[in-house]
Amino acid sequence: MDFSAKTLKDAGAAKTACAIVPVYPRKALSAAAKQLDKRYKGVIADAVAAGDIAGTAGDSLLLHTGDEKGVRRILLVGAGTRSKLDAAALRKFVAAAIRGLKSCKAKDAMLHAEELACEEVPMGALLEQVGRSFESASYQYSETLSKPRPGLAAARLQVNCGEAMKTAAANRALKLGKQIGEGINVAKQLGNLPGNICTPSYLANEARKLAKGDNKLTTRILEEKQMRELGMGSFLSVSAGSEQPAKLIAMHYKGAAASKKPYVLVGKGITFDSGGISLKPGLKMDEMKFDMCGAASVFGTMHAVLAMKLPINVVALVAASENLPSGKATKPGDVVTSMSGQTIEILNTDAEGRLVLCDTLTYAERFKPAAVIDIATLTGACVVALGSHAHGMYANDDKLAEQLTAAGDSSHDRPWRMPLWDDYQKQIDSPFADIQNIGGPGGGSITAACFLARFTKKYKWAHLDIAGTAWDSSPKAATGRPVGMLSHYLLDRAGVKLG
């Protein structure tokens, strides 16, 4: 979708297939709504007076003017009480505007946003949200469909900021939002692809494509032979039952001086998870193609970082593997040696994500990172604890946790910090190895994080359990989360302001 900012004094003088204007409760119209109402002989006032739209946040009503040379449609969207505008009301406004635009065939639209900024969400942040949300809404899966389904018809959105923000700054904020939205769509696409297409080798090729033609990004693919030489026995135990070779994908973005420590993102990339010998139930096993959504979010974030040309260094590590049963598969009770030298008793082969991540987290040490964040669809226990709204977040550094929380708040892609207390560590002690890969029925998401914590003592680290947030089951679709939060985190580290 194309975005541009405008400074327009009279909404009625514009030419657009659909004007999107806010209305408020108690029949209060925005300035743009008043101008359009005057131009089109009271059509808005009549609809409001008839009670067709109340003005509460998220209400919407589509009106047709019949004017093909001016404003053909008017989409009224409730913004709530103007004096009480806040982030929640604006999110509802933007979501309703997208739904309304999807319901019609308008090829372009103009959003009159000059009255929508507030203290909690200044104009620059609002425009980033608009760009990100509308771009993300434009995504439509078509890869394996013989007849692609129709999506959002609008290909262009103009945003009238009035005098609230200079046009150049407004365009920058919209562009940042679009770039993050494109990253979200990259993550959605990778997550939605079936496991017979999106294999570890497919992800490796996607990493090579991302680096092609951009001298700021280099990609290295570690094959199983190299991983074996590095002592990654834990990682390789997961791919043992599959004919698809595992890949450790390393993407290094150099946007700052080499002396600047990189921020490292680690993504769990289990492209299909059957559970291995500890086989999952058949019901909903098809959704285990989404078990690589942590990796997908890392790809999406790197896509956004490249587009935004952030002046920082970022390393992305993707632990890609399949988890399948066979005569060569790892068995419950097997003991393997990790790259760190710690031995692991594998009590459940369906707790495989932590097995690929622990070696990847050890590998991350070589980059001398400023911070490491791993993202993984790790535990069903996190879904039980937090549902589908918040990512489970664990961290060994309070400041890092605060920074991620702030990024989650600004992007509304929020984490919730969970305990990482030593009290839980005894649940993963093993009589036959240094550590076991499950900790029993209680606190499953916590003990999984405690497992990873044993491999992250040499740097600042946070773990995001996105098992509840990475995809929806009805309808089935990847969400692209937490690309928004990660992008905002990196924008903050780069010192980029939204205006």
Image (cartoon, grey):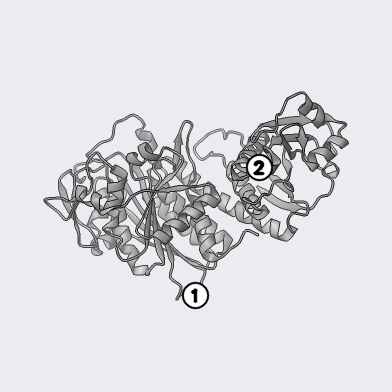
The image shows residue 343 at horizontal and vertical percentages of 18, 56
Assign the C terminus to one quadrant of the image: bottom right
The image shows residue 477 at horizontal and vertical percentages of 48, 37
**Residue type marked 1:** Ala
Q: Which of marks 1 and 2 is in front?
A: 2
Query: Element at badge 2?
Result: helix
Q: Is residue 310 visible?
A: yes
Q: Quadrant of residue 310?
A: bottom right
The image shows residue 425 at horizontal and vertical percentages of 23, 52
Image point (74%, 58%), residue name: 167
**Residue type marked 2:** Lys
The image shows residue 65 at horizontal and vertical percentages of 82, 31
Q: Can residue 243 be seen in this view?
A: no
Comparing 268 with 86, the one in front is: 86
Image point (51%, 71%), residue name: 256
Vertical side of 8 occupied by 399: above or below: below
Query: Element at badge 1?
Result: loop
Comparing 205 with 409, the one in front is: 409
Q: Mark 2 points at which residue?
A: 84
Q: Quadrant of residue 172?
A: bottom right
Comparing 162 with 51, the one in front is: 51
| Residue 257, disc | 1
Vertical side of 237 occupied by 151: above or below: above
Q: Do the residues labelled 1 and 2 touch (CB within 8 Å)?
A: no
The answer for how far apart the CA atoms under marks 1 and 2 are is 45 Å
Image point (73%, 25%), residue name: 52
Q: Which of marks 1 and 2 is nearer the N terminus?
A: 2
Image point (36%, 48%), residue name: 418
